[in-house]
Amino acid sequence: MTMPPVTVAAAKLGRHPLARFLLSDLPEGVTVEPINVVAEDGAASTGLLYLPPGRRPTTVVHLMHPRTDQSQHYAAPYLLRAGFGVLGRAGRWVNNDVVTQHEQLVLDVAAGMRFLREERGFERVVGLGNSGGGALAAFYQSQAETDPAQRIVATPAGDPVRLDEADLPPMDGLVFLAAHPGQGAFLMRGVDPSVVDEGDLLAVESRLDMYDQRNGFVEPPGASSYTPDFIQAYRAAQVARVQRLDALARSRVEIRRDAERMAADPAFQRIGAGSRERLWRRAAAGWYMVVYRTSADLRFTDLSIEPDDRVVSSMFTDQPHVDNYSEHGFAHYLTPEAWLSTWSGRSSRASLAQSIDSITVPSLVVHYAGDAGISVDESQGLHDGLASTDKDYSVVRHATHYGMRIVDGRVTNERVLDGLDVITDWLQGRFAP
């Protein structure tokens, strides 16, 4: 189901509250069409389809992220000026980490692919994956390029999701813009290993606290300095915490599964009413996990670790030691199934490391060298690991994760456009609008 397109002139459609993705200065005569697509499992999602003025393009750029709305992405005006169509999407769980599972998001991406090809007749679809959208696009493309018999048929929690039976039209190209290695892999570097008690926000093991001055922390704007021994112990403890969280998630899933198996047994009807009721409750139990303190990447404060253009900051603020204890951040409240599928660095399949060796379409990697949470080594590894023989890599200097310019060690409100120029030039060289 779609709504009639609207022609806009110099429209201002809003601002992303965190990334400051201001979508303004649209070219005169651009049409904006609200769309609604339905995945094969019946889940609906929405988006905005932008078409440039003049002739109808044959190539469209598809943007989607696991949890944020990409319908007003800051790249859209630049892509439109270059003559490309743009579909910015919100998935089924927009702004909702609580139940997000990537295996089902693959079906949302597929619904967008079919809409663009079958209903709107675009000849070529290029995926643009920004931040966590990069791992989602790669996960989708890897499944689309995999023989159906070898595709995923269940989530990490064991719930069925038959991608082997799904229609997954492949993309014709991929652009990775400030793409991190996947939400689980990203959180593995940011989860605080000094958490003593998962139920206590403030409990700290001081020997593993990156925000303890005795371990080398310096209050911002000063830069911290951690010893190699501390870094090694810290990162090992991060892995150990994720292992513990995985075990907790799986134990809660297993409680439900055991009850479901018992309830399916014919003997279930012969037990007493009270026992049946208790068993149904276990089978229906909606467990939730609370994961405190996930803004604790050593690179936030020690600029000598994988040095680049970044300044002392978390992903959201120049006070990472405060941010780590705030209500903001990633993966704080979610189901065990969502933890395993999306945020676990050990269990999530939506990681670039697991996807890129299956991707053969032309690909471009654009790295912002001032990104607080993604290193040059990680983005270079993404490029190098892609199976495509047609791939390019570009580093944009002095730009944050959200594309804002760093000047004299401070983040400004000025957007860096170099990366968008690289993207439009690359697209025009391979996919004529």
Image: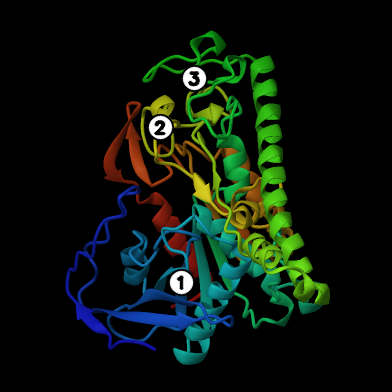
x and y percentages locating residue 252 in the rendered image: 67, 51
Give the Cα separation between the discs numbered 1 and 3: 42 Å
Q: Nearer the viewer, mark 1 or mark 2?
A: 2
**Identity, as a three-letter code, of the amino acid under mark 2:** Asp
**Identity, as a three-letter code, of the amino acid under mark 1:** Val
Residue 211: which numbered mark, if any? 3
Query: How many residues crowd mark 1 within 10 Å: few (<14), some (14–19), many (20+)?
Result: many
Displayed quadrant of residue 409: top left
| Residue at the spot of label 2 | 323
Residue 118: which numbered mark, if any? none
- How many dots with numbers? 3
Query: How many residues crowd mark 2 within 10 Å: few (<14), some (14–19), many (20+)?
Result: many
- N-term-proximal mark, 1 vs 2: 1
Report helix, strand or loop for mark 3: loop
Report helix, strand or loop for mark 2: helix
* Quadrant containing the N terminus in the rendered view: bottom left
Q: Which of marks 1 and 3 is in front?
A: 3
- N-term-proximal mark, 1 vs 3: 1
Displayed quadrant of residue 259: bottom right
**Identity, as a three-letter code, of the amino acid under mark 3:** Tyr
x and y percentages locating residue 383 in the rendered image: 64, 52
* Quadrant containing the C terminus in the rendered view: bottom left
| Residue at the spot of label 1 | 61
Whether 288 is drawn above or below 387: the answer is above
